[in-house]
Amino acid sequence: MGSIESYETADGRRYKVQFRKSDRMSTTKRGFRTKREAQVFLAQTELQLAGGTWIDGRASRITVSEIGPAWLAAKAHLKPSSLHVLQTAWRIHVEPVWGDRPVGSITPSEIQDWVAGLTRHRSATVVIRAYGVLAGVLTRAVNDRRIAMSPARNIALPRKSRKHRSYLTHAQVEALAKEAREHRAMVLLLAYTGLRWGEAVALRVESIDFDRERVLVRANAVNVAGRIIPGTPKSHDSRSVAFPHFLAARLRLECARKAPGDLVFGAGRDYLPTPTHKDGWFAGARKRAVAADPTFPARLAIHDLRHTAASLAISAGANVKAVQRMLGHASAAMTLDTYADLFEDDLDAVASALDHARAAAIAVRPQSRGRSEWSASTRDPRNYAAEPGMQSGAPGGTRTPNRFLRTELLFH
């Protein structure tokens, strides 16, 4: 139970409240002008202490910069590429604006204004990521009982727009592969298996089963800030992906004179660097393909070869579960969400199948007309007058015929 005492100041009488915090340490709150204000504060504080929701006001003075590094350190379980974008968002967008602010002084309206300002100059992806970092830091403050509620809740965020995708035809894949020259096998592998670039460059000779025509995807090598970092695939799970028979010869050439542990692509020891979008070997192949065929997608990115693999598989009749396993998606729902536009033709196919099924069913019906006419005639009461047992006074032991059966049944 707390206590209230008055004390004198140059401005007159004031009141102070003394109470014990959740750690049983005594503390004092001063400056109440009236005893009533002090009583209300004490009642609220005791209620919060009893319910476990009391927050020490001094704890909320900690700044965002003091919590941010610890929050980022707790994300060490993420893949290097995922962690890098969070660190970048913190360094460029969050710390310069919010670093010196005590977490208890931040209001929802300030965060909303900050998000709106970022949205005018940055993409939705960048804005959402920066907001996520700030929200994560403030959630850590809530969990550490430094603030009662996160001011980052219920903030309106920009919507992401669907990225442009290019899907190649078989002929366009062949044209691009031809223009890729010494990287022809890489282009064909990406376009017909759906491997990510990092998964393809991390592929080793021992991971290719030429008898079953499968590649075992169990490693990944991503470029993070100019440095290639090896690791596990994006989903952390290995998977087996089938490749078309025609690709076997190309892959054998890449594996020739290499040890089982060597990398398939490149010299065998060093990972191939990601080709730059503007002036790398892939950009050169794309430019030459566009020059030869004006309908070739001029904005094609190397990741679009993964989308192409999904498109070609679906057009070949692969079901969504097979496509999910090929691409290494976490669920079939993710595959459907990502490639919903590729399944539009399935709706037309369903409608067409229903149309054919109905037409076939109606065409068969006239063959059973005789039975239908018999059934109709047996339902007409006028046809029963001459049948035994249907007239009043039928002989005892005669069962009334079932008009839906063609023989009489007698009870004995």
Image: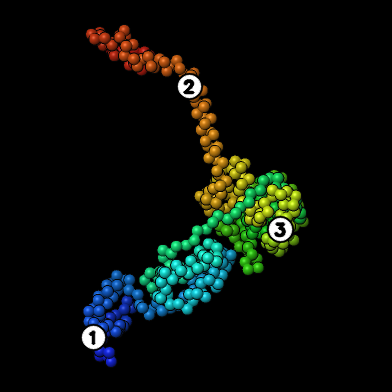
Label 3 neighbour load within 10 Å: few <14, some 14-19, many 20+: many
Q: Which residue is mark 2?
A: 365
User: Which residue is located at x 57 percent, y 58 percent?
Assistant: 234
Q: Earlier in the sequence, mark 3 or mark 1?
A: 1
Task: Say which amino acid is labelled 2.
Answer: Arg
Q: Position of residue 393 (x, y in %)?
A: 23, 8
Disc nearest the viewer among 3 and 1: 3
402 is higher (above) or lower (below) than 291:
above
Q: Position of residue 382 (x, y in %)?
A: 32, 11
- Tell me where residue 259 sits by quadrant: bottom right
Q: Position of residue 266 (x, y in %)?
A: 73, 60
User: Which residue is located at x 55 percent, y 51 percent?
Assistant: 338
Task: Say which amino acid is labelled 3.
Answer: Ala
Q: Earlier in the sequence, mark 1 or mark 2?
A: 1
Specify whether 384 is left or right of 236. Answer: left
Residue closer to the observer: 409 or 337: 337
45 is higher (above) or lower (below) than 177:
below
Q: Position of residue 265 (x, y in %)?
A: 71, 57
Q: Which residue is mark 3?
A: 283
User: Which residue is located at x 50 percent, y 74 percent?
Assistant: 97
Specify whether 80 is left or right of 4. Answer: right
Q: Which residue is mark 1?
A: 5
